[in-house]
Amino acid sequence: MENREKNIDEIIKWYVNVRPTYKNLASKVESIIREVLNSSGISYYTVSSRAKDIESFSKKASKEKYKNPKKEIKDMAGIRIITFVKSEVLQCCDIIKPLFDIDPDHSVDKTKELGNDKVGYRSIHYVAKLTDERLGLPEYSVFKELTFEI
């Protein structure tokens, strides 16, 4: 157990050091999404972003299921889009998917879990990376290999 605790401490120290980069990534992706949605004329309530806070990362990284939290935790940068109605969610998805390199194995459509006859949390979660084309731009190259959740 001592070895595992020491390992977690190192992982948390690593995240403290890289968190500003994830914060910057989240902000850049939020800006891209906001600009594209605004130019498309799609109605939405809000777009926001965050880097996972250190305490939240620590709790998640400590879970037994994460053998390599640095690689396995995909939501260290998160962008949230809130729409007024379900049809806007689908329109946003159609616009957002081509902008990023979406990881289908880690993305989830929670609207299907709830069913059409129930009221509750309806969301679509994409785990993504920036496209190679965008990463080729100097201001985005620092984000190579970093994932984020929309």
Image (cartoon, rainbow, N blue to C red):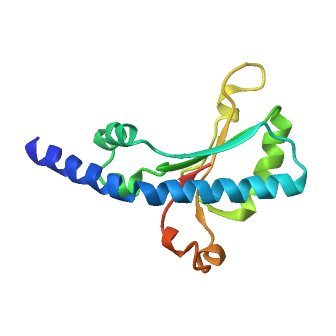
Residue 112, position as x, y percentages in the image:
69, 34
Q: Taking 150 as reference, is 14 above or below it?
A: below
Residue 12, position as x, y percentages in the image:
28, 49
Q: How many marks?
A: 0
Is 6 placed left or right of 70 in the picture? left
Q: Is residue 104 visible?
A: no
Is 9 placed left or right of 87 in the picture? left
> In the image, what residue occupies the spot 78% across and 57% down?
35
Is 20 placed left or right of 81 in the picture? left
> In the image, what residue occupies the spot 58% across and 79% down?
138
> In the image, what residue occupies the spot 61% across and 76% down?
132
Question: Which of the 4 image quarters holds residue 122?
Answer: top right
Question: Which of the 4 image quarters holds residue 47?
Answer: top right
Question: Which of the 4 image quarters holds residue 102?
Answer: bottom right
Of all residues, the one furthest to the top in this rendering is 118
Residue 83, position as x, y percentages in the image:
78, 36
Q: Taking 25 as reference, is 120 above or below it?
A: above
Quadrant holding the N terminus: top left
Of all residues, the one furthest to the right in this rendering is 41
Q: Taking 56 as reference, is 107 above or below it?
A: below
Q: Is residue 132 visible?
A: yes
Q: Residue 61 versus residue 23: which sits nearer the camera?
A: 23
Q: Residue 96 versus residue 31: which sits nearer the camera?
A: 31
Q: Residue 124 versus residue 5: which sits nearer the camera?
A: 5
Residue 121, position as x, y percentages in the image:
66, 26
